[in-house]
Structures are given as structure tokens and as C-alpha cells.
Amino acid sequence: MRGVDVFEAVDSRISVRAFTDTPVDEATVRAILEAASRAPSGGNLQPWRVFAVAGAELDELKRLVRDKRPGEEPAEYEVYPPSLWDPFRTRRFECGEDLYATIGIGRDDRRGRLTQLARNAELFGAPVGLFFCLDRRLGPPQWADLGMFMQTVMLLARGHGLDTCAQEYWAAYPRTLADFLGLADHEQIFSGMALGHRDPDHPINGLRTRRDPLDTWCDLRGFTS
């Protein structure tokens, strides 16, 4: 199934946080991942290792994480630097406020926000969880390569009429995932990703996060027209 072209894929890709229970077959997942392997990597290292989990195995992983207390495991890495500064702090704040506003959770509703955060462990109802790992001995350039691979997966998913949500949330459970996936000591979890069909009626999927204008972050030099 070819859902959209590349321009539509880029424009229509959002972080979906409410999925239907419509299954995604193995052949489709395989096709997306095989095509994504054409993503670039420095020296063609292809540093990614991917686990695609569905069905009863995914249910078991959800149960394992559900039974964990927040902060019970040391995180694989800090998702954001401490004391985030502007413009990054403002962007993150606005994103959070806009997200919670779609589902009627106020700024002071700490319980509501924690409940929504915990939905990450359920992959927001998606039928497939993708888990992206790499050798911990690799460096920042290979992390960037893995990010390009993940973006390629997300755009190809749109081409198949599917949606995704990248989830650094899973880096908070490195021991659980290492045991569950059978990772070697030199391997680490980088990110998870929910994959499935978006629920078109859920208000949280109506969020389209803001982007700063091009001229605020890009200098165009040397052009004659």
C-alpha cells in the first residue's frame, strides 16, 4: 500500500498518541524496516539494531514496565539537559501545554499529567512497538545516524498509511528492556517507537506542534536570486 508521497509524508507525520487496535502485519513491518535500511550512515556503519514486538510478547513487555516505579532504574541517558535554556525551554513548555490542552488537562493537574505520561508504557495503544538499539561503544555521529534511520522509518510508515510516535521514554527502563530483548552488555536502548493506525477521532491527534520561521534558525548566504 502506497499512502502518500514524500512531501505529504513529511508534512503529515506527527507524533500520534492515540492508536486504534487495528493490527499491522509482519510483512508491512518488514517492508518498512528493509526500505529504511537505505538511510545514510557515516562509513556505512549501519549502527542500528531493531526489535519489532507485537502480540503477546508486546503485552508481556507492557506488563513488565507497568509494574515498575518511576525512577526505579537508572536512565540510559538524560533526554534533556538540566536547567534547559531558551529558546529550547520555551519550545518544550509550549509543546507540553498545547498537548495537555487537547485532552483537557490543566497545568496544575499533576495526576492527570502523570497518567498521560504513563500511556507511553502502553505505546498509546499501538499494536507494534519498535525498539532501536546500538552498540554503546559508538559515538555521537552514530547516534545521529540512528536518528536518520528512525526518521526514515517514520516517513515510510506514512507511505504505508500508518503513523508513529518516537519515544525516548523507554530509555528510562534500560535494565528491563535489556533483559526482555536479550541485549548484550555492550548494547543499549536508544528509543522506542509506537507504530500503527492513528485514531482520527481522538483530540490528542489534532495537535500540530509549532515550528519557528525559517529565518529564525537558518542563514542563507551567497545566493544570487
Image (tube, grey):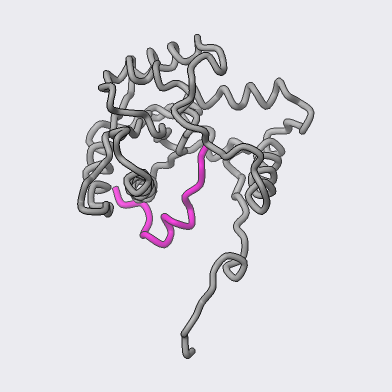
Total marks drawn?
Answer: 0
Nearer to me, 158 or 37: 37
Residue at 50%, 28% (x, y): give it. Answer: 124
> Where are the magenta residues, as a range?
1-16
Q: Magenta stretch: residue 131 in it?
A: no
Residue at 34%, 49% (x, y): give it. Answer: 141
Q: Most extreme residue toward the bottom, as rendered?
A: 224
Where residue 161 appears, x then y in whole percent?
38, 46
Where residue 1 appears, x then y in whole percent?
29, 47
Q: Most extreme residue toward the right, as rendered?
A: 108
Q: Is residue 160 above or below residue 60?
A: below
Question: Which image quadrant is residue 182 in?
Answer: top left
Question: Which image quadrant is residue 174 in?
Answer: top left
Q: Is residue 2 above or below residue 119?
A: below
Where residue 67 appears, x then y in whole percent?
50, 9
Q: Is residue 202 left or right of residue 74?
A: right
Residue at 65%, 23% (x, y): give it. Answer: 114
Where residue 66 appears, x then y in whole percent?
50, 13
